[in-house]
Amino acid sequence: MTRITVDPNTEIRVTLSSPSNGADWLYLSFYEPPEDCAVSFLSAAGETLLTTKESHPETLYQRLAVPGGCTAISLRGSRAFTLSTLFVSDTEPDDSYGFLLSALEEADLMIVLASPVYVTEALSGLIPYYAGEHGVKTAVVYMTDGRRYELHESRLALKAMGLENEPISLFLQDNEWNLPKDIEQSWNASAYGEPVDQLIDLLNRLQPKVVVTMGKDHEDERVAYTYSLVKEALEKASHQPKKAYETDLHGKTVLSFGTPLYAFDGKTAKEVAADAYRLCKSRGVYRKTLPDKLALSGIRKNYSSETDLFQGIATSELISYVVPTPTPTPTPIPTDTPEPTAESTQQPTDVPAIETIAPPELISTEVVQVTTAPTQQPAKGLFSCGARAVGSASPAVTEAPTNTPSPTPTATPEPTQEPTPEPTATPTPASTAEPVPTDTPAPTPDPAFTAHFINDGSGKEEVSVDFENGTYVYRSDILAVEIQRHNTTVVHDRREMPCVYYVADIYEREVDSFRPTFGSFKHNGKDLISAQTMSDRAKCVLWITGDNLIQSDPDIKGILIRDGYLFRESKKFDSLVLDSKTLSMYISPAGSISARDLLESGAQNAFSFGPTMINNGEQVESAKKQRTMNNPRTAVGMVEPGHFVAVVVDGRQPTYSDGMTMPELMNLMQSLGCRVAYNLDGGMSTTMMFLGYKLNQHGDGRDPKTGVSAGQRTMPDGLTWGYSEEYYGYPARIAKSR
C-alpha cells in the first residue's frame, strides 16, 4: 500500500480537473488515527466550502461527501499523520479497496477482538450467520496493535462475510501491549484515553443487546487483556447489554455454522468464513480449517444450552433481525440436451490482498504540498491520488518517494494513450496490445524454478525426510524448502576441525510465504522465548534465528522494521530489506535512506545485525575483518527473486563442529550463488527448525576451548517461511527417521 507521512502544519492538496457536481466521494485511509487532521473542500475562488475535523476517529478508513462546486481538497494537521490511500470517485470503489460504509451509530451485536487477525479464525461463521444472513447490526471493535496490512485484510474479510460497516479501532495506549517504550510513536496515545473508558463510551453509544469477546484463557496475552477490559467496561457502563459472552471450548452456548445460508447462495457460514479467511494472506495459514461450531460462555452469567445469541430476546427489541424466507434452490431438470454450465457467482476463494492500492481510471490529479510553517520540513514523498469521471482524461500525476533505495525495483508506469474510438483495422502491433488482467502473473517462470513445487493446484503438502543423509524436503503449490546437512572440515589454528552446517534452499511464489515471529504476542522486540515455542506458534515449515531485534545491542544496529512497524532508526549501519512486492531482498546501506522513506517505499521488514557479506554478487571486503572468531553462525541470502538461501552453522563443539569464521561463511554463501547475503544473530542463538523439529545441535555447558557458552538461548524474534496444518505430526515422524 502507499504510505506517506505528512509533517505538522503541512498541507497536502488534491486539485480536481473540474468542479464536483455534488455526487463525488473522498476516500481516505490512515495508518494510525490522525490526532489532528482537518479536511477542507475549496471552491475555484479558494473559498472554504466545508471543513471536517476528525479529532480522534475510530475508523481508519473514511468516506466523505464532496460538496458541489469543490475544485480542490486540502488536508492539514498540527500534528503529523500518515496516509495510506486518498482518492476521489463518483462511484462506489470495487471490493479490492475494502471500503465499507460509515461506522454504526447503534448496534445490536458488539464483537470485541484483541486484534484484526482474529476476525475469522476465532469466530468462524458468527459474522456471516448474524450480520450476513440475519442482517443484525454488528459492530466489530479491534483493540488493535495497528499493523496496517492486517487491518486492510480484515476489512476485506468482513465485507466478504456480509458486514457493511467499518470496524472500530481503539488503539491501546499501553506500550507494553505491543510497542517498546523507547520507541517514539507517531501519535500521542495518551490523547485517546484509557482503553476501558473507550469501551464504556462505545457501549453507551452503540447500545448493543449482545457483546461477544474472546476467552480469557487464550494463549495470546492480548486476548486475556482484552477480556479483562471488556469485563470491567461491562461493570461500569450505564448501558447494560442483555447478554455478554466469551469464547470457551466448554461453553454451553453452542452455535452451529453448517446450515446453508440463503444470503450466500447456499454456502454454509463456515464456508463463507473460510473463503473470507483466505483473503487474510498475511496470516500465512493457507489451509487452516475453521470450526463448524463455536462454543461460548456467559461472562456474567451462564446462558445454558442456547443455540442463538439472541435467544430469549424479542426481535421487536432489535434494530434489525431478518428471518430468511426459504426460497428453495431450483432442482435441475434432466434434459436430453445438456445445458451450458453456468458461471459461478461465488467470489474467488483465494484472492490475495493487494499490496498497492491505486485507484482505477485516475484522471487529472494535481498534488500540491504547501509548508505554511517556515520551520517545518514539507512532507516527503508524493503518492497517486485523483478524481474520476469529472471531465478530461489527463493522466494522474505520480511521484515516487525520494531516496528510494536503488536495489528496489521501481514499477514502470504503463504508457498513457490518448482516448481513441473502438479499435481500428490499422495493424500496429506495438500500440494495440490488449490490457493485461491485474491477476495475470508477470513473465512465465523458469521451468527449473517451477519444478520445485507440486504444481497441481491441489493445495496438498509433501514432506520427505532422510535423516541419515541429512535431507529434509517440503513441497506445496506455493512453497518449497529443500534442506541439506553438510559434514566437512575447516582449518582453525593450523588444525583440521569438523564443521557441520545446514543449507536451506527456499523457493516461494507467494509474498506471504515469509513472515516474522516474535518472542511474545506483545510484539515489543524484547520478550524472550524459545525457538521451539516460536516455531510451534507459527506452525511454520522453516524457522531460523533473526537479528535479536532490540533485546540487546540496539545501538549497533541500523533500521529495524517488522510487519511495517519501526523498532529502530539508525543511519550508522546496514540493514537487510525484504521486498515483498518483488519476492526479493536487498541491502540498505548505512546512511543511504531514512527509516521513514524506507517505510514509504513499501518496506515491511528490515533486519540489522550484520555485517553485509555479499552485495550485488561481490564479497564486501570490510566484512572479512569482522567477527573473525570461529563460532556458530546464521545467514540468509538471495540467489534470485523467489529463491532464498538460509544457512545455519553449528559450533563451539570441537568434537562435533567447531563453527566458522566470517570469511569462511562469506565464501560459503558466495559458492551457493547468493547475489545478496547477510549475517544474522549467531552464537547461542543459532537455530534452524523444520516443521517443528530442531535440525542443528547445541552443546552442553561451555566450549572447552574458549569457555564460551555452547547452549541454546531464548530469543525475541525469528524468520519463518510457510505454514502447515500438519505441523504437529511431523516432529514425531522426523524423529522416527533417526
Image (cartoon, rainbow, N blue to C red):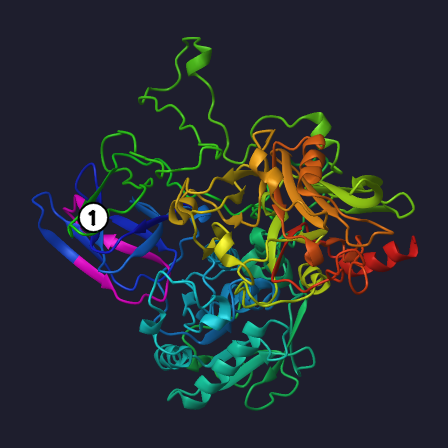
Specify whether residue 295 is in view. Answer: yes
Residue at the disc numbered 1: 73
> Can residue 241 be seen?
no
Give coordinates of residue 573: x percent, y percent.
48, 46
Give the image quarter of residue 715. bottom right
From the image, which quarter does the C terminus lie in? bottom right
657 left or right, relative to 632: right
Residue visible at 46% across and 75% down in the picture:
110
Across and down, in percent, residue 606 comes to: 52, 48
Residue 321 at what x, y percent from top left?
47, 73
Secondary structure category for the residue under label 1: strand
The residue under the point 66% across, 44% down is 628
Give the side of residue 725 with respect to residue 732, left or right: left
Examine the rendered structure and indicate whether residue 383 appears above or below residue 146.
above
Local packing at callout 1 (Cα closer than 10 Å; few below 14, some 14-19, many 20+) is: many
- Choose between 485 and 144: the one closer to the eye: 485
- The answer to whether 440 is drawn above or below residue 355 in the figure is above
All told, the count of numbered labels is 1
Residues drawn in magenta: 51-73
Residue type at mark 1?
Ile
Q: Position of residue 400 (x, y in %)?
A: 36, 36
Above or below, 321 relative to 572: below
Q: Residue, x 59% and y 29% (percent of image)? A: 618
Q: Nearer the viewer, residue 163 or 729?
A: 729
User: In front here: 487 or 288?
Assistant: 487
* Magenta region includes residue 68: yes
